[in-house]
Each structure stands twice: as C-alpha cells, then as structure tokens.
Amino acid sequence: MAKHLYETFQPTHYDLYINVDRAKKLITGKTTIEGTAQEAAIAVNQKFLTIQSVAANDAAVPFTVDDANERLDITLPQAGDVTLTIAYTAPLTDTMMGIYPSYYTLNGEKQELIGTQFESTAARQAFPGVDEPEAKATFDLAIQFDEQPGETIIANMPETKVEDGVHYFATTMRMSTYLIAFAFGDMQKKLTQTKSGVEIGVFATKAHQPKELDFALDIAKRAIEFYEDFYQTPYPLPHSYQLALPDFSAGAMENWGLVTYREAYLTLDPDNTSLSMKQLVATVITHELAHQWFGDLVTMKWWDDLWLNESFANMMEYLSVDALEPDWHIWELFQKSEAASALRRDATDGVQSVHVSVEDPADIDSVFDGAIVYAKGSRMLVMVRALLGDDNLRKGLKAYFDAHKFGNATGADLWAALGDASGLDVGAIMNSWLEQPGYPLVSASVENGDLVISQQQFFIGEGKEVGRQWQIPLESNYAAAPQLMTEKSLNLGNYEALRSEAGQAFRLNVGNNSHFIVKYDDTLMADILKEAADFDPISQLQLLQDARLQAEAGAISYAEIVPLLTRFAGSAHSVVNTALNQAISGLGKFTTPGSDEENQLKALYAKIFGHQYARLGLVPQSTDTNDDQLSRETVVGSVVYADDAKVIEDAHALYLAHAANLDAMPADPRPYVLISEAKHFGDQALLDSFFAAYRKTSDPSVKESLMAAVPRLTDPELLKQVVAHFEDADTIKPQDLRAWFRGVLNNPAGEQLAWDWIRSEWDWLEKTVGGDMEFTTYITVISGIFRTQDRLDEFSAFFEPKKDVPGLGREIAMDTKVIATRVALIAKEQAAVNAAIKAAL
C-alpha cells in the first residue's frame, strides 16, 4: 500500500488566506500549517498550484513540486513540531472542482457565484495541505475577493469580522480537508432556528423566487432536530447552511455546516412541483444532513471505507423522511430506486465489492459507484437494522459517536459498537456482504416431498462461479426457516406438513429488505400466484422484480414475464405500477424501432396502462391520493410511449394552453406533455421555443422536463442542432450534459449522432468533466442502450484502448459484458417474447 502523507506529517491547525480575483480568474493564497513532522523529509498535497515560497518556522526551506503525484516535497532542518508557511497562486477554473465559478442569468445578464467542491481530492487545488480524510485539523479561514456592494459570503463557520476587505470566520472543529467550503456572490437567503438553537439557512441566487427556498428550509430544520434526537448526539456547529449552486457536478455535498446542492435538489416551487420531486429533494437534504454526524463528526479513516459514509447516509435519508412525512411511505421509493439499481448492477461479474481497496486519486472517484456504495450498501444497513431493531441501532450509534467524534473510524469500529449494543456478531454477518461482490439467488423447491432451499451467486451474463457464500437473513413467513441461512443448502422438512401448519404459500425475503432474489419452483410459484392479488404492494413489486432479473439472466424465459404483467395491471399502488413499467420496458429490447413488433408492444402498454389513464387523467385532481399522484407519472409516460390517440390530444391541448409559460403548466404531467409534443408536433419552431424556455427558466423541474423532451424529436436534422449544443455551456451546462446525451442516444433517430459525437469529442469531454466522479457513467449510459452486435463491436473498438486509463478499466470491462449479455439474450429470446406479447393482446 502506498504511504499516506499523514504518516510523516500530522497537521493540527491551518490558517488559510485565500484571495479570489474573478476578473483575472486567479487565486492568490497563503497557507500556514501547524503540525508535527515525523521525519525531516515531508510532503503536502497540491494540484495545479504555482508555489512561490515555503518557509518552516519563518525560515525558507528547500522544496520540489511533484505534479504527477500531486505533491509538494519539503525538506525541513529536522523532525518535530513545525509551522509551515506556503505562498502560492492557482487558476480559477471551470471544472466544477476546487474553487470555481457557477454561472446563471439574472434579468438577461450573465452572473457568477463562486463556490467550492473538494471531495474527494480537490481541496489541494485550493490550498496546500495533507488532503487525506485522516488528517483532521482545525481551520481558520480568511477570504478576500473582488467584492461588489450587496454580495454575501458564507462558510463552514460563522463570520467573526471583516478587516481591510478580508472576511474572517470562526475556527472550525477538528475536520477533514475535503469538507471545507465557502461561497460568495449575490445571494438571497432564508433563516430559521431549531429547538436546540442551531441556525438553519437556505441560500440561492436571486434568479429564484423567494418561495422556492421554503420547502428546503422546513425539511432541513426538522431533519436536524430529528437527527439530534435519533443519534442522541447534539449537532456540533452553530449553523447548518444549505446552498444551491447553479453549476455542480454531483447531486449534493455534505461540507460540514455548509452543504452544497445542485439547484434541482434544493430549490422548488411549493405551489407547482410533483410529489416525486418533493420526495427526491427531501431525501437529498436528509442524506446530506445525516452526514453531518456520520461522515463529518466521525469520518472514514481512508477512502476504502467511503461506503461507510454513503451507505449509512443513504439509509438514514429514508428513515428520517419516513419520520418527517409518514404519509409519503418513503420506503416504497427505496424499493423502487435503490433496491432495483443495486440488484441490477451487482449481478454483473466484475462489479466492485462495497468495501474496496483504493489508493490512486483517479481510482478514488471510480469507487463512488452509486448502485454499490450507496444503494447496495444502504440495503446492507437496512438488513442490519431489521436484525438489530431501532433501539439497539440507536444505542450502538451513540456509543460509536461518543468514541470517535472529531476523529476517524473504520467499518470494524461501527460493527463493534452495534455488536456491543445488540449482542449479535454484526461484523461476521456483514463481512460476507461487504467484502465480496455480488449476491445470492436462493432457490426454493419441493424435492421428494421436502421443502429445500439453496444459495448460489446470481449472475446476469457470464459469471465465474467461485463458491461465494453469504449469511442470508431469510425473512421467511415459515417458522421452519432459520433467521440466518449460513449453509449452501437447507432441508426445511415435509412440505405438505409445513404448508398445512402455515396456512399460506411459502415465501422468502418478506418485505424485500435482504439483498437476494428468490427462484421458486413451479409448485411453489403456482401457490404464490393464487395469493398474489392479496399481497402488499412491495411483495407484488418483488415478484415482478425477481422474475425480471431472472429473465435478464436467462434463468427463466423472458416470455414468462408477459402473463405476470397482465395479472398486476390495474393496481392503485405506485410501487406496483413502477415495477410493471420496469418489466414491460425490458421487453422493448426485443423489438426493432418502427416494426410491427414494436407496435404490438405499444398495444400491450395501452392494454396494461390504458384503464389507469382513463381513471387518473392527465392533470392532478383534488381527490388524488399520494399513490395516484405518483402513479400518474408512470401511467402517462407509458401511454405517451404507446402513442395513445387520447393522450396525444389531451397533451397537445394542455401544451397549447401553457406554451407561452411552461413554468405554469401542472408539474406532474409536464415532462410527458412536452415529450408527446416533441414526438408528434416537433418542428424547428418548437425546438427554438423549447431551447428559449430552457435558457430562460430558473425552475429546475421545468429544465428537467425540457431535458427529457427535446431529445425525443424525431427529425434527425433537428437532433443535429441539439447535438451541436452539447458543447455550448451557455445552453447545456456540463453538469446536465450526460442526461442530454443519453436522451439523444436512446432515440433511434439520434443514436448514431450521439455515438459519433462522443467518439469524436471524447478528449473534450475528458477535459471538461474528466475530474468528476460521474465521468465514467457516460460509459454506463451507453451500455444501457446498445443492443446489437455491430454496436458491441464499435463499443469495444472505441473503449478497449482506454482500459488502462485510471478509473475507467473496471467500468469498460463490465459494460462490454452488459452489452454482450443483452445481444445474446435478444438472439435467444426474441421470437418467444414477441409471440407472448401477441398472445397477451
């Protein structure tokens, strides 16, 4: 393992002076670091800094800059306590990393807001220091900038004074470099206070209506209060500020005391935003605020335990929103999004484990695999919570925070605390899930009259069976099944006797909280299907989801999915409608765009969702339940795909009524109304008006609707104009480019255009977003769409030579396999699937 800089030099306190000249795009800084050198030869991190001088205890010392390793090597007279003073300059760049400008338009004029993004290794672009999570220190921040009247500056801690144009902030708690944050510019704010006296603030540019800050302010206040109670540990800072940045590469970032967000995940119009968008914003805010304890107060020791931060916050976002808004049934969203994405990604051979060793800074970004580190990891913790119960969970967490606050910890430290609280060997259970990739398929069958269950690793596509085994919380409805399955197979006894005693069909993973799927034999499945109409919505989702995954893997025929769809059509539950939509959309790969088979598939969509559309209509009603609101999005999107004449007519009328002001169109159907308009009435005038509206609106959900609609135009000449805007940051911000690219690539009329663009402009893309943890997901997006041998060959030809680029190798290998698996599945199943669709009509 590479030596960490912290081993030879341990900073205890930083004085940071940073002067930002926006006009010259120049940062001038002086960093003073107090610390202890274990050796005379030490190093601190720097990236893109021009070092002017280095002094130790006020005397100049020799130094060399090692740009390749992002280091500044310093030779001291001797080891021991030392105060380093480093003067430097740095460019103010547009990479959305380090200190950078965000751009927005106000009253027709381009403005900028300066903010920061330091995770994972970009603090070193702002100031020299030991930029490693374990190197916690206190920080005094002094910021100067080319200040204009009325501008605001905020940071992790409250401002204490302004002298000679320099803004000074209170000394921070002991914290990691990657959590330092500040921002300045022309901002508006709304403030409130928690019961315990913590000041809560929401900040945004003045391009937003003031009411767009209200929802976030309310959620943030109640979330901090909830966490103080749940963790039984006070929030340790004077304030918790939430800031919407117009340009932001991630979704949000948990900087201690100053959380930064994409505008779409913080600001919303309380009078016209869909329930699904409110849920998304609430879960993003509660995720980041969960981190204020878990990640900020106690921080992972090194990046290999990144999952500790993210998986935990991912679970807590749902737990807290469920407490704040119980009517939302937010755990259903967890099942629709987190569980589904984890199961799909984790079934591809070559996927990373949740806990993964990592050293190279480029590889650190690549371990932020959302489906694994966030989604799978949070499923692991949901599993642990179900085993422990909330009382033991809270008791263990309080002990964990008490033992490690203002310091660092590893996964083993958390398991020890939870184990002490519960009496369970949590570490032994979790290691089988965290240290190895993948998950089990549990097969249940009646053999010679006995009910037998067995586990083996589940793969979609080719997978190397290496005998992995898991400790599986079975969550069965039969008492004969143990709480934990630790063997390869179990005989539970005579099936008839067990069935008679239980009085219901045999099931595993009731509640769908454990990370495995189940393959029931024909006898057991037939029994389940007799009762399935009475199952709770999550159990119905689970049946559809497990069947779809097994069909993707070829464990059952894909044609078997079709009769299941008609069985669950007409459900009033949004989770079931989502699962139906996911399953039926999986059939699309077996049809050729514009063919008779695709028209058959559209007819199946209409059959499954048409009655629902007749019931729900296009626009929200005062009588809607939450399920109705959430289902409407799925249902309308499905009938729009089906080219249903009624929905085309309804959508066109609604569009014409709001064409001059898309912000005022009801938010729930808006994306699908605009998609329908683009598909059926798309011309040059519509494209021009959509782009004009996109540039003008400050409502993020309107932007998202337009982002979904414009790429659905059917005229290749119009789509060429869309692709021509990919590198026009004044229209399409780099943070949003992936969604635009995916939209055009996923359109048969635009697939070639988008594929040609990314191959010819890869160097530009790498330069623009290459330092960003989402960069590799451009490759993932392509692998989610390609489905022919020709495209697989082109994909391999283009990406194979890039396998040695740090951070890209694993993704390229996995995604090549994903496309190859799809190509093989289509060849094998196409005829049977299309016959089953025809038979279902």
Image (tube, helix red, strand yellow):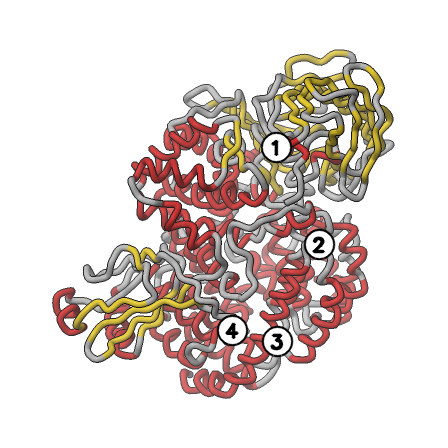
Residue 401 is situated, as x and y percent measured from the top left of the image, at 43, 29
Dot 1: few (<14), some (14–19), or many (≥20) neighbours within 10 Å?
many
- Lower sequence index among marks 2 and 1: 1
Three-letter residue code for mark 3: Arg
Closer to the camera: disc 2 or disc 4?
Answer: 2
Q: Which residue is mark 4?
A: 644
Q: Which residue is mark 2?
A: 806
The quadrant where residue 151 appears: top right
The quadrant where residue 231 appears: top left
Dot 2: few (<14), some (14–19), or many (≥20) neighbours within 10 Å?
some
The quadrant where residue 670 appears: bottom right
Residue 787's disc number: 3
Q: Which residue is mark 1?
A: 179
- Lower sequence index among marks 4 and 3: 4
- Lower sequence index among marks 3 and 2: 3
Q: Is residue 372 left or right of residue 717?
A: left
- What is the C-alpha distance between the residues marked 4 and 3? 26 Å
- What is the C-alpha distance between the residues marked 2 and 1? 24 Å
* Label 3 SS: loop
Q: Is residue 791 left or right of residue 600?
A: right
- Lower sequence index among marks 2 and 4: 4
Residue 208 visible somewhere in the drawing: yes
Residue 270 visible somewhere in the drawing: no
Is 808 or 756 nearer to us in this picture? 808
- What is the C-alpha distance between the residues marked 1 and 3? 42 Å
